[in-house]
């Protein structure tokens, strides 16, 4: 991620292009897309000059965008849907809260965060009984809205060891993912359901 995650459209230039069959492979000077694989997230729809990108892959030039679009010059704009980006950032920001709150108050280790277009999920090991699951769910549904209403700012800054993210009184450490700038932007938090697996539970919350 090279730019402010709120940006949904940029004017940029083509660094390199290659034509393969009916497709154009484009390397651009700037990028607003996220590392969806690393984030374990769905892929946003990406457009070059309002033409859908059919494929994106990495190369020595950075991300390469494959599209039917045939550019007439080196100037181009890259865009994604703003509402989808905000929804994704909301899900990613909740990762900080869920991770920190369950570690701080319940000494639970959360892992396996994932985000699709409908909902998001995470896993907790060593939860085997219904009463344990309900205790965790009830706690999250009670405490997270309090933090959301607090309106605390979320700030990420570069350091010698990479980006560091700070949410006062909640989280200070390695940046986990892109995020909103304020907890109040998260809005309503709602857990939709949970399921038991071999080693624990998977919890699903609405995007």
Image (cartoon, rainbow, N blue to C red):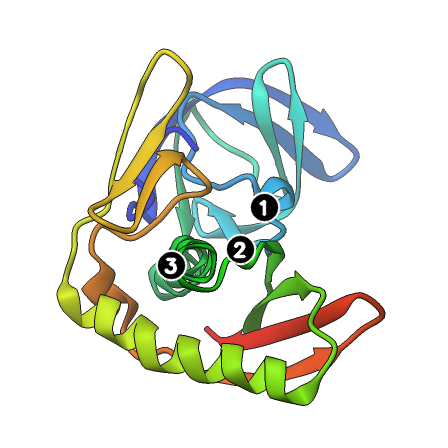
- Neighbour class for label 1 at 10 Å: few (<14), some, many (≥20)? few
Residue drawn at x 42%, y 75% is 140
Can you see residue 59?
yes
Can you see residue 118?
no
Q: Are marks 1 and 2 in contact (CB under 8 Å)?
A: yes
- Neighbour class for label 3 at 10 Å: few (<14), some, many (≥20)? many
Q: What distance separates the C-alpha of mark 3 from that of mark 2?
A: 23 Å
Is 89 left, or right, of 131 in this rendering? left
Q: What distance separates the C-alpha of mark 1 from that of mark 2?
A: 8 Å
Decide which of tag 1 and tag 2 comes sooner along the chain.
Answer: 1
Q: Position of residue 160 (x, y in %)?
A: 36, 11
Decide which of tag 3 and tag 2 comes sooner along the chain.
Answer: 2
Examine the rendered structure and indicate whether residue 144 appears above or below residue 48: below
Comparing 52 with 184, the one in front is: 184
Q: What distance separates the C-alpha of mark 3 from that of mark 1?
A: 20 Å
Q: Quadrant of the N terminus?
A: top left
Mark 3 — residue?
97
Q: Quadrant of residue 27?
A: top right
Decide which of tag 3 and tag 1 comes sooner along the chain.
Answer: 1
Query: Can you tell which of label 3 and label 1 is closer to the viewer?
Result: 3
Residue drawn at x 75%, y 79% is 196
Q: Are marks 3 and 1 in contact (CB under 8 Å)?
A: no
Mark 1 — residue?
36
Mark 2 — residue?
44
Question: Which element carries disc 1, helix, strand or loop?
Answer: helix
Question: Which element carries disc 3, helix, strand or loop?
Answer: helix
Q: Position of residue 92 (x, y in %)?
A: 44, 55
Q: Quadrant of residue 192?
A: bottom right
Query: Can you tell which of label 3 and label 2 is closer to the viewer?
Result: 3
Residue drawn at x 29%, y 45% is 7
Q: Position of residue 59 (x, y in %)?
A: 66, 20
Q: Position of residue 9 (x, y in %)?
A: 33, 45
């Amino acid at each position: 991620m090279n730019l402010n995650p709120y940006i949904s459209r940029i004017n940029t230039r083509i660094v390199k292009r290659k034509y393969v069959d009916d497709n154009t492979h484009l390397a651009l000077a700037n990028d607003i897309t996220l590392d969806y694989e690393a984030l374990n997230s769905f892929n946003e729809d990406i457009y070059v000059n309002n033409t859908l990108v059919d494929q994106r892959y990495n190369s020595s030039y950075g991300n390469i965008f494959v599209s039917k679009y045939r550019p007439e010059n080196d100037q181009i704009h890259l865009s994604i849907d703003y509402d989808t980006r905000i929804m994704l950032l909301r899900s990613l920001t909740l990762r900080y809260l869920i991770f920190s709150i369950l570690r701080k108050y319940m000494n639970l280790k959360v892992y396996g965060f994932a985000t699709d277009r409908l909902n998001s999920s995470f896993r907790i090991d060593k939860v085997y009984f219904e009463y344990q699951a309900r205790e965790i769910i009830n706690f999250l549904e009670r405490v997270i809205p309090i933090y959301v209403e607090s309106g605390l700012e979320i700030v990420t800054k570069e350091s010698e060891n990479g980006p560091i993210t700070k949410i006062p009184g909640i989280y200070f450490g390695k940046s986990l993912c892109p995020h909103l700038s304020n907890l109040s932007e998260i809005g309503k938090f709602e857990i939709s359901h949970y399921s038991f697996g071999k080693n624990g539970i998977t919890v699903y919350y609405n995007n």
